[in-house]
Amino acid sequence: MITAGIDVGSKNIHVVILRDEELVGRWVVASGFEQAEAAWRALEGAAGDAGITVEDVDYTVGTGVGRKSVDFVDHRVTEIAADARGAYRLIPDARTVIDVGADEARAIRIDETGKVLDFAVNEKCAAGAGVFVEAMSRALEVSLQEFGEMSARSKESIPMNAQCTVFAESEVVSLIHNNVPKHDIAKACHDAMAGRVAAMARRAGLEEEKVVLGGGVALNMGFVKALQETLSIGEITVLPDPEFLGALGAAIIGAEKGAGTTAGLGKQPQGA
C-alpha cells in the first residue's frame, strides 16, 4: 500500500510517501497563497522522488495549519496527532515531543504506546517559533546557518526583555549600537526563544527521560543548545529529517486508516 502524508504549514508544505510503511519519497515546496495547488505540486514532487505517479497513491492524509485548504486528501489529522505518531515511529521510547516550526511551536507528552497524554501550543506568538529566528538573523545581517553557529560559540548570557518579535528586533538593534558582539546577541535571541518553548513543554508535563525535537528549527544548532540548557535535562534527541516529522506521522496514519479501503486521491485542485 502506498500512502502520502501532506503537512501544510504556513511557510512550507512537506510531503512524505510510504510504500508498505517504508519511506520511498519526500518533497517540500513553499506554501504561497494557493496552498491547495502548492500541496498538489509537493505531492507530485514526492511521487516523482518515489518513482511513481500521484495516481499510484492509495491513501492521503493532510495535517498542518492549512490542512483544511487541501480538498483532495482522504483524511485529515491535527498536527498533534501527526507529530506524536511520527516521533513514536522514529524513537519508540520518546515521551516528550517538541516541534518548533515557522510560526508555531508545540509540546506533546506521549505514553509507552505513542498515545497522546497531554499537549501545549504556543499562544499564537511568533517569538516562540522559527519566524523569530529569521527576523533576528535579518537584524544581525547574517544567514540563518551562521546565526545558529555563532550563537553556539557564545559564552555570555544577555537577557532579552522583549516578549514580542517586533520589540525584540528593536532590542537587537540597540545591542548592536552598544557594540555587543553579534554571537552574544544571537545567543540572547536563542535563549529567549528557548525559554518560551521550555515553559510550553512544562505545561504539557515534561517527561525528562526522553525528549525529542522536530520541526525546521531543530536544524538550528544554536537553538538546540539553548533549549537543552534551559530544560536542564541532559541531551535532547533531534529527530532525523526533523522538518518532515508531521508529514511522516500523517503518512503512517494513512497506512493505518487506508488498510482495506478503496480510497484514493480526490479531485485535483483547479489550476494545479
Image (cartoon, rainbow, N blue to C red):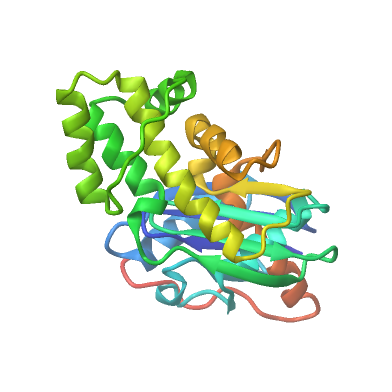
- Depicted 188 relative to depicted 125: above or below: above
The percent position of residue 251, horizontal first and vertical second, equals: 66, 62
Residue under the point 60% across and 38% down: 228
Q: Is residue 77 left or right of residue 173?
A: right
Residue 192 lies in what quarter of the image?
top left
Please state which of residues 182 and 86 is positioned toward the viewer in this rendering: 182
The percent position of residue 92, horizontal first and vertical second, equals: 82, 53
Residue under the point 72% across and 72% down: 117
Residue 86 at least partly seen: yes
Q: Which image quarter holds the N terminus?
A: bottom right
- Depicted 122 relative to depicted 150: above or below: below
Q: Is residue 85 left or right of residue 187?
A: right
Residue under the point 56% across and 73% down: 78
Residue 4 at least partly seen: no
The percent position of residue 220, horizontal first and vertical second, equals: 49, 34
Residue 175 lies in what quarter of the image?
top left
Q: Which image quarter holds the C terminus?
A: bottom left
